[in-house]
Image (cartoon, rainbow, N blue to C red):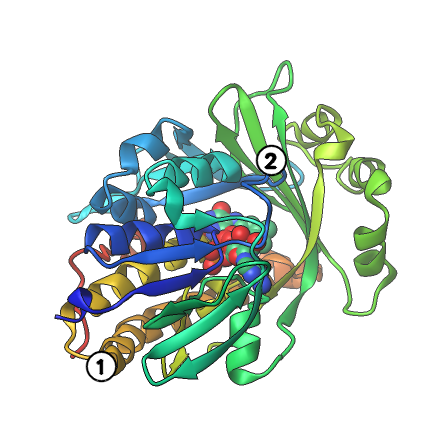
Amino acid sequence: MLRQRQTVTICGGGLSGLTLGLALHEYGIPFRIFERAPGLSEIGAGITLWSNAIAVLRHLGVAEAVRAVSEPSQGGVIGLANGQTLLEAGAGDIGDATGQLAIWGAHRVELQRALYAHLPRESVHFAAPFLSYRETAAGIVAQFGQHEDVESSLLVGADGIGSSVRAALFGAAPPRYAGYVCWRAVCPVPPGWAGVAGEFWGAGDRFGVVQLPGERLYWFAVVNAAEDSELRRAGAIEPRGFKSFLLERFARYRFDVPAIIEHTDATAIVFRDIIDRPPERGWSSGAVALVGDAAHATTPNMGQGAGMALESALILARCLADSGTLRTALARYERTRWLRTKRITETSWMIGKMVHWEHPFARAFRDLLFQKTPPAARDRQLMQIAGYDAATAPLAR
Ligand SMILES: Cc1cc2nc3c(=O)[nH]c(=O)nc-3n(C[C@H](O)[C@H](O)[C@H](O)COP(=O)(O)OP(=O)(O)OC[C@H]3O[C@@H](n4cnc5c(N)ncnc54)[C@H](O)[C@@H]3O)c2cc1C
C-alpha cells in the first residue's frame, strides 16, 4: 500500500484542494495544503452542488455541515426573458430508479468554510503562493512564498483554471474564451419576489437565480461579448458601472429580474469572463499531478465544475490509497476520470453556445427542441451526471 509511505503537497485551497485534503485524511495519507490567499475570502458568489457532489461530501462525512449552509432546491424553471416558461420541475420531479436529483445552493465561502472546519487545522497554510518545484530522488520539493522547502512524494496542482503548477509542468497556455462574460452576486430576497428560481434566456444574454439559506438569492447575469470587445474589457475595469449596466441590459426581463438586480449592493457584484480548457490528456508527470479545474476546467453551463472537482479529488485519493506505485495510481486516476470530465466539458460548451444564440430562428428551434425532449430522456441524461458516486465508482485498472 502506497499510503504508508507517501505524503502529498497540495497547491490551492479551493474546492478541489480542500476536498482532496479531506479524502487523504480519510485514507490516512499525510498532506499539507498551500493557498496563496491570506484566508478564506468573503468575496464571491453562490454555487450549486448536485447529487454527485453531495455523494462525495457524504462519503467524507461533511454533508451535514454543508447542508447546514445550503438551501435545497425546491425545483425551478427554465424560461424566456418575456416570461414564457419552457420547463418547470418541482422538487423530486426529476430522477429515475437510481434516485432523485438533489441540488443544493450555497455561498461559496460558506461551503469552503464548512470543508475547512473538518481538516486538521495545521494542514492548511494561507498566504503561501506557489513559486516552483524540483524533482529529487525521494520525490518532490516545492516552494511556496516565505515557506521553507516543502518535501513530499507528490505535488498536486489544485490551483484552478489558471494553475501555476500546470504551467510549470506543461508550459503556460491561455484558457479558451467562451464568447460571453458573467456578473454574479448574492443579495437579500427582494420584497415581493414571486419565488421563481431557475434560468431565463434572452437573445445573447441570460439570467439565473438560485435560493440560498438566510433569505438570500445568488444570481448570475451572462452576456455575449466578442473576444476583443469593449464590453469584455469594460467589465474588468469598471466595477462601479456594473449595476447600472445590468439594470439597463436586463430591463426587459420578467421573473423579477430587474427587482433582483435593483436589490443588490453594487459593490457585491463580481465580474469574470467565461473560459474553460479543451479536454486534454496528461494530468500528471513524474511526481506532479493536477486536480479540479487545473486538470479539467469546464464552462459553468451545467453547474458541474465543482462537481467534477470534488469527484476527481476523491478518485485521486482512492487511487493513491489503492495502488502499489505512484505511477500506477496517477495513471489509474486519469483513466478513471478522463471520459466523464471530457463529456461534461464538451456538453457544457455546446449548451453555452445554444443558450446564447441570438438569431430568432435559431432560438425558436432551440426552445422547441428543449420543450419536445421527452421527460424520460431528459431525466436519464441528468441522472447520468447526478447519479454518479465517486466513492463507489470502479477505478480503472
Ligand atoms: C461563473 C461561474 C459559476 C460557476 N458555478 C458553478 C456551480 O454552480 N456549480 C459547480 O459545480 N461549479 C460551478 N463553477 C465551477 C467551479 O467554480 C469550479 O469548477 C471549481 O471552483 C473548481 O475548483 P478548484 O479547486 O479546482 O479551483 P478554484 O475554485 O479556482 O480554486 C483554486 C484555488 O487555488 C488557489 N491558487 C491559485 N493559484 C495559486 C498559487 N499559485 N499558489 C497557491 N494557491 C493558488 C486559489 O486562490 C484558489 O483558492 C462555476 C464557475 C464559474 C466561473
Where residue 135 appears, x then y in whole percent? Answer: 42, 82
Q: What residue type is labelled 2?
A: Glu
In the image, is 73 to the left or to the right of 193?
A: left
Question: Residue at coordinates 48% horizontally, 34% vertically from top-left?
Answer: 110
For numbered disc 2, what is the local secondary structure?
loop
Where residue 138 appears, x then y in whole percent? Answer: 32, 80
On the image, numbered disc 2 is attached to which residue? 42
Query: Would you identify the image quadrant in which residue 393 lies?
Result: bottom left
Where residue 125 appears, x then y in whole percent? Answer: 48, 50
281 lies above or below 242: below
279 and 143: which is toward the camera: 143
62 lies above or below 148: above
For numbered disc 1, what is the local secondary structure?
helix
Where residue 155 appears, x then y in whole percent? Answer: 40, 70
335 and 190: which is toward the camera: 335
261 and 336: which is toward the camera: 336
On the image, numbered disc 1 is attached to which residue? 328
361 and 313: which is toward the camera: 313
Label 2, label 1: how many angstroms apart (C-alpha)?
A: 39 Å
Please tell me which of labels 2 and 1 falls first in the chain.
2
- How packed mark 2 is, by other alpha carbons closer than 10 Å (few <14, some 14-19, many 20 or more), is few
**Res 155 seen here:** yes
